[in-house]
Image (spheres, helix red, strand yellow):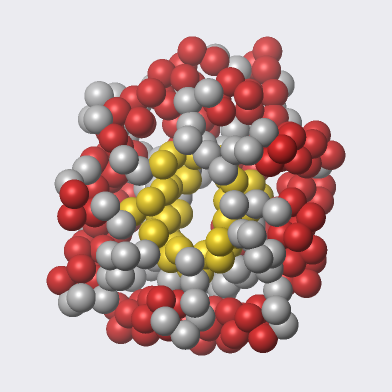
Amino acid sequence: MIKIAHEAPIDLFDEVQRYTDYDYCLVHLLEQNSRYRDIFERTIKKGREVILDNSIFELEEAFDADKFDQWVNRLKPSWYIVPDALEDVGKTLDQMDDWNSKGYGFAGSGKIGVVQGKTYDQIVECYTYLDGASECDMIAISFDYSYYATSCPHPNKYVSWMLGRVKLIGDLMRDNVINRNKKHHLLGCGLPQEFSFYKHDDYSFIYSLDTSNPVVHGIKGIPYKPEGLWSKESQKLHELIDFPLDHLDINLILNNIKQFRKLTNG
């Protein structure tokens, strides 16, 4: 089974946590929001598994590496995602080398490298390096590479993203690039039904995923259909982190979360 985490507004965090397998933390919110910081310090003390993200999706560039290292050592998460560069294989690998050469990170935390690139060959290059020379403990693959528009063109870009990642993972398996002995993380979600493709034992190397998709759609009053969704709200969860509880339809959000889990793990 794939471990699932859903980011949620602070006021809904404890309720959502009851339906997730671990917690996903955005580093820039640790710095900006004391309530958010308190939640994750408490979560770590409880012994919950936590992935600390470098917030590149939210900020459109990775959090400063020096400050990120300070937060890794302060929070001591189970895992952390090394600062990377969107679709830039050269810069991503340079930043990984810089991280390693400076001895950054916390010895008790697993190191996650994110595959980046604009073409299949670049993605393979990045993956191979992260798997080997960089000594990553887990490798992450994103939901929205521009490459997917080429590999799986579709009038609905969310279908392209969904099928694009499925095809990419299949191609990496076909070409014996995937290291089946290493854990993999799926970053984000185009359409929730994507994850039903990974139920077979062939995908046992997929360890975890994170997405706020069922929560954001619940906040927007959009229920999941039995088959999932065919569109995606563009608003990012970190923009809703202080959304008040009395404005939330908690049952709708939780029903979306339950439907997401059913699609992913049955």
Going by the image, does 206 lie left or right of 69? Answer: left
Going by the image, does 206 lie left or right of 176? Answer: right
In what quadrant of the picture does the C terminus appear? top left
The percent position of residue 46, horizontal first and vertical second, equals 67, 33
Q: Residue at x 76, y 48 (%)?
A: 30
Going by the image, does 41 lie left or right of 133? Answer: right
Q: Using the image as rendered, state which of residue 104 and residue 149 is in the foreground.
A: 104
The percent position of residue 99, horizontal first and vertical second, equals 66, 78
Q: How many marks?
A: 0
Is residue 53 placed above or below 66 in the rendered structure? above
- Residue 187 figure quarter: bottom left
Residue farthest along the front direction in this orientation: 108
The percent position of residue 249, horizontal first and vertical second, equals 54, 14
Q: Residue at x 49, y 77 (%)?
A: 135
Residue 122 appears in view: no
- Residue 72 figure quarter: bottom right
Q: Residue at x 20, y 68 (%)?
A: 173
- Residue 17 figure quarter: top right
Q: Using the image as rendered, state which of residue 48 and residue 94 is in the foreground.
A: 48
Is residue 246 placed above or below 175 in the rendered structure? above
Residue 223 appears in view: yes
In what quadrant of the picture does the N terminus appear? top left
The percent position of residue 19, horizontal first and vertical second, equals 48, 25
